[in-house]
Image: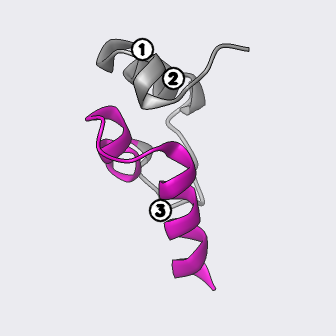
Amino acid sequence: MKSVLIKDTTKAERIAIIKEWIPYEDGCEDCDIDLWDMYRDYINGEKEISQINAEFSSEQN
């Protein structure tokens, strides 16, 4: 599996990674999470996925 770390990816590759996570049929019907918004800092090379996930987890608790 290829690394998804910012240092190992281009912005285009990070966008492709997030696209893979978005369901093909209109996303989550019961879900209010916008993955593009949630992972914007990752796409822009500002935060790693693990940082964003940790922040999200702490907000949910």
Q: What element carries label 2?
A: helix
Which amino acid type is shown beneath numbered disc 1? Glu
Residue 10 colored in magenta in the image:
no
Check the image and report above or below for 27 versus 12.
below
Count neighbours of disc 3 (C-alpha within 10 A) and say few if under 14, some if 14 to 19, many if 20 or more. Answer: few
What residue did someone put label 3 on?
Answer: 32
Image spot of residue 49 (x, y percent): 52, 44
State the residue in front, 52 or 23. Answer: 52
Task: Locate residue 61 relative to residue 49 in the image: left or right.
Answer: right
Image spot of residue 52 (x, y percent): 48, 56
Q: Quadrant of the N terminus?
A: top right
Q: What element carries label 3?
A: loop
Contact check, label 1 and label 2, Cβ < 8 Å: yes
Image spot of residue 53 (x, y percent): 56, 57
What residue did someone put label 1 on?
Answer: 13
Q: What element carries label 1?
A: helix
Q: Disc 1 and disc 2: Cα gap in Å?
A: 6 Å
Count neighbours of disc 1 (C-alpha within 10 A) and say few if under 14, some if 14 to 19, many if 20 or more. Answer: some
Which amino acid type is shown beneath numbered disc 2? Ile
Q: Disc 1 and disc 3: Cα gap in Å?
A: 25 Å
Residue stretch rendered in magenta on the structure? 36-61
Task: Give whichever of discs 1 and 3 has the lower sequence position.
Answer: 1
Tell me which secondary structure the magenta stretch mostly adopts.
helix
Task: Determine the residue located farthest toward the bottom in the rendered image.
Answer: 61
Check the image and report above or below for 37 versus 2.
below
